[in-house]
Image (cartoon, grey):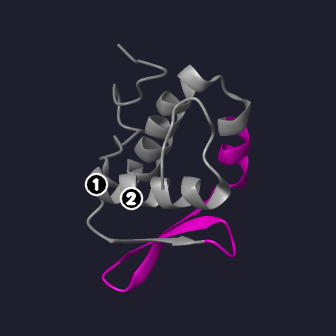
């Protein structure tokens, strides 16, 4: 697979690139690109923990200017890894970052 920022990746190259980058970015589970369904499947300890349909993000990738595609790929990878982030508990006084209570 040859990647050029100037020419968009084919569907299969896109899927393979996203899968490889998710794994490289630190996903501890198994990351598989399923070309027949054009999606990424992530498994952890034998259990499917995430499905990522690539159809819409691929359309967005094609719609971007060449100089914006790498940034979009980075955001896709960040989205795939969000399950590893700690989500703050809301409902306790002062814990809602949107509606701060005094």
Instruction: Indicate the position of residue 45 as horizontal and vertical percent values.
Output: 30, 82
User: 10 Å neighbourhood of mark 2: few (<14), some, or many (≥20)?
Assistant: some
Q: What element carries label 2?
A: helix
Query: Which range of residues does the magenta coloring cover?
Result: 35-60
Q: Is mark 1 on a helix, strand or loop?
A: helix
Instruction: Indicate the position of residue 36 as horizontal and vertical percent values.
Output: 69, 76
- Which image quarter is the C terminus in? top left
- 89 shown above or below 32: above
The furthest residue to the top: 102
Front-most of residues 83 and 69: 69
**Is the residue under label 1 in contact with that under label 2 (CB below 8 Å)?**
yes
Mark 2 → mark 1, Cα distance in angstroms: 6 Å
Query: Which residue: 47% across, 54% down?
Result: 17
Name the residue that disc number 2 marks. Answer: 20
- Residue 37 inside the magenta-drawn segment: yes
Name the residue that disc number 1 marks. Answer: 24
Is 34 placed left or right of 27 in the picture? right
User: 10 Å neighbourhood of mark 1: few (<14), some, or many (≥20)?
Assistant: few
């Amino acid at each position: 697979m040859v990647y050029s920022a100037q020419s968009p990746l084919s569907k299969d190259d896109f899927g393979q690139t996203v899968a490889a980058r998710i794994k490289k970015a630190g996903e501890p589970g198994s990351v598989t690109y399923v070309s027949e369904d054009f999606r990424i499947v992530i498994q952890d300890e034998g259990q499917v923990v995430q499905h990522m349909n690539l159809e819409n993000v691929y359309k967005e990738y094609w719609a971007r200017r060449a100089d914006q595609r790498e940034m979009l790929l980075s955001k896709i990878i960040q989205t795939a890894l969000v399950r590893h982030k700690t989500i703050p508990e809301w409902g306790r006084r002062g814990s809602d970052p949107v509606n701060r209570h005094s």
